[in-house]
Image (cartoon, grey):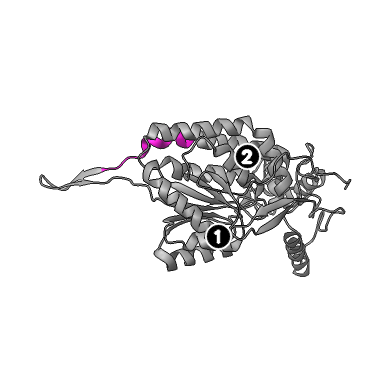
Amino acid sequence: MPDKTTPDLNFSPKGLYIGGEWQESIDSGTFETINPSNREKLGDVPEAAEKDVARAVAAAKTAFVEWRRVPIAERARCLEKLAQRIDDHTEELALLDSVDAGNALSGMRGDMEWTAKTLRYFAGLITEIKGETSSHGPRHLNVTRRQPYGVVAKINAFNHPFRFCAEKAAAPLAAGNCVVIKGSEQAPLSSLKLGELCEGIFPRGVVNIVTGGAKAGAALVTHPDVNRVAFVGSVPTGRAIAKAAADSNLKRVTLELGGKSPMIVLPDADLDTAVPALSAGIFSGAGQICTAGSRMYVHEKVFDMVVDGVASAADALKVGYGFDAETQMGPLITSDHRERVARMTETAIREGASVVTGGEGIEGDGYFY
């Protein structure tokens, strides 16, 4: 694979975004973020300590007092304004995620379009936040009124870095909550860029963004003033979050974990349609997405044709640096992940599987397989 220098991102972290201001971490801790396409260092990112998380939660709690009273039309306008800023910065954001996470640039452009549409969707859905009334007789009237939780923590994955940080915050913000967002430590840059885009739109403290690893995430989950937690990521981490949330103050938890749904091909399938769909289902995002169809159940009558077709599609893929406009599939996110994929392949071969194409690392500095 030819050498390629990381393009200029015209972005560097200003700090943690807390209470509408950029602040250094209390202990001045940082961690490196790496371009998985060529292993070049992209910069030093502030690493939030427990006290930083506490500051962010406190800012959100303070802002909630007024934000919950903001008219729904004004909350909708805030989401609309953020959606427009995302539209205005699509290329910049797409390049940022493509470099930091290794995803194909074309896919990240689609992420930005999807994110802006999601924000507009929830801006339009705000008026549907309604309660219910019911009568249990002439002297009884039951009334329900939906109330915001207060401070909501959003902990996100690396595979759609900006999209998850922005779109997963849309619903809680629309409902009158304040958020503390923790972007992925493996691709943290665009989460901080989101803070820049939010400036001047939301009141101070409504949106707060911290970066860091498991310690920052654990501090968010266990903080007594966080009333709801949403997480996108692995099953083991999801289990740990659910347990920690239950042990602290029985927080409401939403977990979006590994799906890996099977794809089924019956003998009457149109293979000219099915094979490209099967290929897109697993090769998108280098297979590092929860919706990846990592298992195929294929009827024996068409089995060989499907295997040949998917192998041909794999051979035809343009694998390369995520920020290369021609790339269809980029690298894996870390060296550890590449080694894990290699071990899984080796295990499958020992257990009787046959490799019809690929099955080994690709030369170069990046985490390609």
| Res 295 visible | no
Q: Between residues 259 and 263, which one lies in front from this camera angle?
A: 259
Q: Between residues 51 and 225, which one lies in front from this camera angle?
A: 51
Which three-letter amino acid code belongs to the residue tagged 2? Asp
- Examine the residues drawn in magenta and state their main secondary structure: helix
The label shown at residue 217 is 1
Which three-letter amino acid code belongs to the residue tagged 1? Gly
**Residue 87 found in image quarter:** top right
Give coordinates of residue 148: x percent, y percent: 37, 47
What is the distance, in whole Å, between disc 2 and disc 1 at their CAs? 24 Å
**Residue 124 found in image quarter:** top left
123 falls in the magenta region: yes
Q: Between residues 26 and 40, which one lies in front from this camera angle?
A: 26
Q: How many marks?
A: 2
- Kind of element beneath mark 1: helix
Q: Earlier in the sequence, mark 2 or mark 1?
A: 2
92 falls in the magenta region: no
Residue shown at 27%/43% (left/top)? Answer: 132
Mark 1 and mark 2 in contact (Cβ < 8 Å)? no
**Magenta extent:** 121-132
Give coordinates of residue 166: x percent, y percent: 55, 43
Residue shown at 66%/38% (left/top)? Answer: 93
- Kind of element beneath mark 2: helix
- Reading the image, the residue beneath label 2 is 111
Is residue 249 left or right of 209 when viewed as pictured? left
The label shown at residue 176 is none
Residue shown at 23%/43% (left/top)? Answer: 133
Is residue 30 left or right of 166 when viewed as pictured? right
Where, quadrant-wise, is the C terminus in this rendering? bottom right
